[in-house]
Image (tube, grey):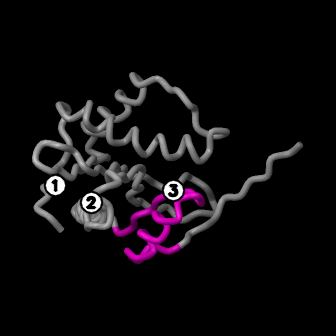
Amino acid sequence: MPNYKFRKAAPQDLEGVYKIFSLADDQHRQAHPEIFQQTFDSKDAKEYLLSSIKSTDAVIFLAMNSSDIIGAILAWVRQTPENSALLPITYVSVEKLIVVENIRRQGVGKALMEHVHRWAKDRGIQQIQLTVWDFNKSAQDFYNNLGYQMLHQRMRKDLP
């Protein structure tokens, strides 16, 4: 892997964080325009990202190429919902991961995931969960190669 730097995002990174995560949002909107809003309030999105940067229960790690953000990951500490059928589990949920297209397959995504793994372990958390959409086969392969296993599948049917 070339000489990339990795660090936690800070409030002054907000515009760059918003820009890189917008790339992932664009992929989802293109794949499922019937689910994802084609336009959304950037103010709300930035407020969410800023709250993630400032929260002790969340982290955004950045991959940097000099001063450019080339990848980012967002993760939150979560708990299973209170439900008599589920065991109470605290886990880290990877909410977003994106690496710019021309940098992919150089180990940046893996390094970002490793940062989240260490962050979780530092908090005594032993499990990572994430959602990957069916259209995103390359992401599924990526996570499988990191040892992630399918937990469940969500299905839908549109009625006429």
Q: How many tags in the picture?
A: 3
SS category of the residue bearing label 1: strand
Q: Which residues are magenta?
A: 126-149
Query: Which sits earlier in the primary sequence, circle 1 or circle 2?
Result: 1
Q: Which residue is mark 1?
A: 6
Q: Amino acid at mark 2?
A: Leu
**80 over 106 or under it: above or below:** above
Q: Amino acid at mark 1?
A: Phe
* Place of residue 121 in the rendered image (x, y in percent of width and height, measured from the top left): 26, 66
**Marks 1/2: CA distance?**
8 Å
Q: Which residue is mark 3?
A: 80
Q: Which residue is mark 2?
A: 112
SS category of the residue bearing label 2: helix
Q: Residue at x 55, y 71 (%)?
A: 150
The verdict on residue 129 being magenta is yes
Proximity of marks 3 and 2: CB atoms separated by less than 8 Å: no
